[in-house]
């Protein structure tokens, strides 16, 4: 082989490797090639994610089932404690988190968000008949629980400072917080209002919500690792979410799981 042929062969090999690397860097292409899309979630966050007789159900599952059907791939869902979900995403254990993740400025620096899938404004739930709490400000000086690592917990802490102090307790799961509220070890639980409303509707003899909501307007969305590799995947999911808003599937599933259809932004909302 002469020198020119050798250089040509090396160049051709380099281009082939580069092309292969570029293809591998497109997560959407990988998903379609494999026919499978992998997700991480916490299946103990009703009505978004829950286990019923060992079967995964909820708003997020129903929404993502529609998305993957439109993509022509099969979803694979992994159940993890919430504190392990985002670290698992960063470790590459799955391609997207389909748990409802609150959109915050801090998280947007680390993750790529889809368009919103639901409202995430923070509210309160109390024991039914507890007349001490009729509005959010009434929790001043009381014991209030919220889920560890959640945006709602951070808003609760800020709100507590504004009303003169709250004894905040952090829980690994919202179900544990509900159990302590029912047992009288907490005076209230703070979380996303749709989540609390669902819990109160299922056990009205034990829980009732407190209105109005407080803090900044927030939304839930799904997330992926922030990289060029995930850009086409996020864009494809967003296209389907908008299609679902237009054809009524989004409203139908919101009514099924949240009791009412919620109007959602058609572009990424501004966050502080």
Image (tube, rainbow, N blue to C red):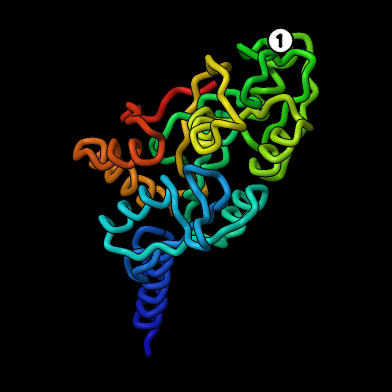
- Of residues 214 and 206, the one nearer the viewer is 206
Which residue is label 1 attached to? 162
- Of residues 126 and 111, the one nearer the viewer is 126
Quarter of the image where the N terminus is located: bottom left
Residue at the bottom extreme of this rendering: 1
Q: Is residue 215 above or below residue 32?
A: above
Does any portion of residue 22 appear in the rendered image?
yes
Q: Tell me: 211 left or right of 5.
A: right
Point 41% across, 35% down: residue: 258
Q: Position of residue 90 (x, y in %)?
A: 59, 53
Give the class, few, some or many, for how many residues have Cα within 10 Å of label 1's Cα (few <14, many ≥20). few
Q: Position of residue 229 (x, y in %)?
A: 44, 54
Q: Position of residue 168 (x, y in %)?
A: 77, 27
Q: Is residue 103 above or below residue 67?
A: above
Quarter of the image where the C terminus is located: top right
Point 48% across, 53% down: residue: 96
- Of residues 100 and 191, the one nearer the viewer is 191
Q: Position of residue 111 (x, y in %)?
A: 53, 42
Residue 206 is drawn in which quadrant?
Answer: top right
Point 35% across, 65% down: residue: 74
Q: Is residue 124 above or below residue 225?
A: above
Does any portion of residue 108 appear in the rendered image?
no
Determine whether the residue tagged by mark 1 lies in a helix, strand or loop. helix
């Amino acid at each position: 082989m002469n020198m020119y042929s050798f250089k040509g062969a090396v160049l051709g090999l380099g281009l082939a490797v580069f092309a292969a690397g570029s293809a591998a860097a497109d997560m959407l292409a990988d998903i379609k090639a494999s026919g499978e899309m992998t997700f991480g979630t916490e299946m103990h966050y009703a009505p978004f994610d829950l286990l019923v007789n060992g079967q995964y159900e909820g708003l997020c599952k129903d929404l993502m089932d529609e998305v993957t059907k439109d993509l022509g791939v099969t979803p694979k869902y992994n159940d993890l404690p919430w504190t392990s979900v985002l670290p698992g995403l960063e470790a590459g254990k799955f391609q997207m988190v389909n748990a409802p993740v609150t959109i915050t400025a801090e998280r947007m620096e680390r993750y790529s968000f889809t368009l919103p899938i639901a409202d995430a404004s923070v509210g309160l739930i109390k024991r039914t008949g507890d007349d001490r709490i009729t509005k959010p400000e009434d929790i001043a000086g009381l014991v209030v629980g919220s889920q560890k690592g959640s945006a709602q917990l951070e808003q609760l802490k800020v709100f507590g400072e504004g009303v003169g102090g709250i004894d905040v307790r952090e829980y690994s799961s919202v179900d544990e917080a509900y159990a302590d509220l029912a047992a009288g070890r907490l005076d209230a639980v703070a979380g996303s209002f749709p989540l609390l409303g669902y819990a109160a509707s299922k056990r009205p003899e034990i829980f009732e919500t407190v209105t109005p909501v407080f803090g900044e307007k927030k939304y839930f969305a799904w997330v992926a690792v922030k990289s060029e590799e995930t850009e086409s995947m996020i864009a494809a999911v967003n296209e389907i979410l908008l299609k679902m808003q237009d054809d009524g599937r989004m409203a139908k599933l919101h009514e099924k799981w949240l009791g009412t259809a919620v109007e959602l932004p058609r572009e990424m909302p501004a966050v502080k």
